[in-house]
Image: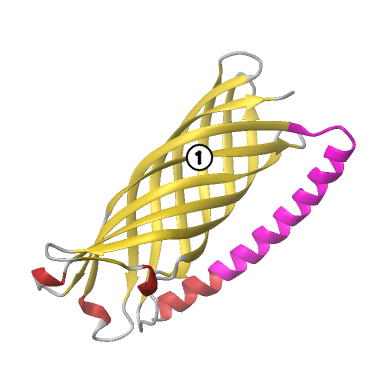
Amino acid sequence: MILATNIQLYAKRFLFLTLLLIFYFSLYTSINAQSGNGNYTFGFNVTGGMNDVLHRSGDEEGKTVKWKPGIMAGGGIFLENMFTSHLGIHSGLSYAFHECDLEFGDTPDAQLTSQNHSIIIPLYLISSFGNKVRLDILYGLNYLHIIYNTMSNDNDSTNGIRFINYNQFGCGLQLRLAFALNRFTYFYAGPHGQFYFSNVIESTTWRDYLYNIQFEIGMLFKTF
């Protein structure tokens, strides 16, 4: 319980500081764009990897809860603005499918498979190094909205959206290794991790934190 409280405390500080930085850089980017100095990039990606939940029990009942990692897959589009050769901002819209298993004790009938269909909106800062071969480090905030959830076992299936917190707020870190195909086009690949600080299950005495570890590939198209 103390660990969960500390996680929340540091998470709030991190989110607050990151939000201040993003607000500053967003304002700076807008001013540059109005001056005709905006360097925009757009692109698309596909991604796949592991979805899991970090469980922190708050009482005896919570100690019987176990999550098993599952799969995640998705893809989306994004827009970036580089306001210097090394600094920029990134946002977009992605679809994601998440699946993992939830168990209550050792009772097989109590095992549920949870499947989420979600949209993700990132707001990241970019630190970029290189030209024809680029290393981009993206870091910042994520908003995840679960559109539909299915909870099922061997005997039954139900829409579980009423049992979960479908608005998730968190942070992310992404590494991109990008290769120039020509002056305006890059192919990239790299790992991407996301961690969310909102409790997954509503109205519980324990805490469950959703996180993803995935590998992403995509294309970047420069307009400058």
Image height of 62 relative to 116, above or below: below
Name the residue located 12 percent from the left edge and 62 percent from the top edge: 154
User: Is the magenta region chiefly helix, strand or loop?
Assistant: helix
Residue 116: percent from left, percent from top:
36, 57
Observer-nearest of 93 and 199? 93
In the displayed structure image, the side of residue 27 where residue 218 appears, left or right: left
Quarter holding the N terminus?
bottom left
Residue 114: percent from left, percent from top:
28, 61
In the displayed structure image, the side of residue 81 where residue 182 appears, left or right: left
Residue 17 covered by magenta stretch? yes
In the displayed structure image, the side of residue 20 where residue 137 appears, left or right: left
Circle 1 residues within 10 Å: few <14, some 14–19, many ≥20: some
Observer-nearest of 47 and 58? 47
Residue range corresponding to the magenta coloring? 11-39
Residue 203: percent from left, percent from top:
39, 82
In the displayed structure image, the side of residue 109 where residue 81 appears, left or right: right
Observer-nearest of 54 and 33? 33
Single out the residue that lies furthest toward the right. 35
Q: How is the image coloured?
A: secondary structure
Amino acid type assigned to the residue bearing label 1 in the image = Gly
Residue 58 covered by magenta stretch? no
Residue 210: percent from left, percent from top:
39, 62
Name the residue located 74 percent from the left edge and 56 percent from the top edge: 23
Total marks shown come to 1
Quarter holding the C terminus?
top right
Name the residue located 66 percent from the left edge and 15 percent from the top edge: 183
Q: Quadrant of residue 57?
A: bottom left
Q: Which residue is mark 1?
A: 76
Query: Label 1's element?
Result: strand
Name the residue located 39 percent from the left edge and 59 percent from the top edge: 148
